[in-house]
Image (cartoon, rainbow, N blue to C red):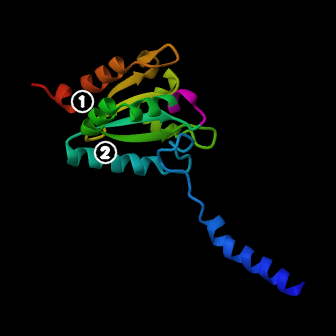
Amino acid sequence: MMKYLMAIGCSLLLALPAVAQQPQPKPGHLDSIYNPTANAEAELGAAIKKAAAEKKHVLVQVGGNWCIWCKRLYKYVEDSTDLRTYRDANYVVYHLNYSKENQNLPLLAKYGNPQRFGFPVLLVLDGQGKLLHIQDSGLLESADSYDKRKIMGFFRNWSPAAVNKS
């Protein structure tokens, strides 16, 4: 009996590392798009710096993991090769959390309180952090999803090439 209990105990001890090392949700997982504990000011600053170096704009999607339309927009763009490729070629993307845990109100106030449009709301910043545009994402919807043509139009209209035309 003692050998039996020892065998079970050893088996449990060997299994513990496997349980402890279960994979965490990937950043692209729909329940972890936004990070309520992030230092949003610092992370957005890093995105702006990266955009300047890459001669891109910053696309800020403001929302939360609680928001079904935020998840739909994220998934819609990620699942569309055309939209994702164009976005990534022209924008550095940052997902700014707005939730009961952290509303990031001082940062949102700096950009004109875009949460007044509902969620998700999109901000386009230049490589210096200057607000170029606030986009009500409701205008990019079609029925119970998003409209590819409208999203691509938004991406194109606020790309560095479009904004910096002389």
Q: Quadrant of residue 86?
A: top left
Name the quarter where the N terminus is drawn: bottom right
Residue 148 shows in this picture: yes
Residue 149: % across, % down? 33, 18
Q: Residue furthest top?
A: 143
Residue 51: % across, % down? 26, 44
Circle number at residue 48 = 2
Q: Main secondary structure of the magenta part?
A: helix
Q: In percent of the image, x 21 and y 49: which residue is there?
A: 53
Q: Dot 2: what SS?
A: helix
Residue 64 vs residue 149, the one in the foreground: 149
Circle number at residue 159 = 1
Q: Which residues are magenta?
A: 66-71
| Mark 2 Cα shell of 10 Å, populated few (<14), some (14-19), many (≥20) | many
Residue 112 shows in this picture: no
Name the quarter where the C terminus is drawn: top left
Q: How many numbered marks does the figure carry?
A: 2
Q: In percent of the image, x 61 and y 35: which residue is there?
A: 66
Is residue 24 positioned above or below 159 on the image? below
Is residue 19 positioned above or below 118 on the image? below
Q: Quadrant of residue 111?
A: top left
Q: In percent of the image, x 25 and y 41: which residue is there?
A: 127
Residue type at tag 1: Ser
Residue 66 vs residue 117, the one in the foreground: 66
Q: Earlier in the sequence, mark 2 or mark 1?
A: 2
Residue 106: % across, % down? 49, 39
Residue 162 vs residue 33, the one in the foreground: 33
40 drawn magenta: no
Q: Is residue 61 left or right of residue 160?
A: right
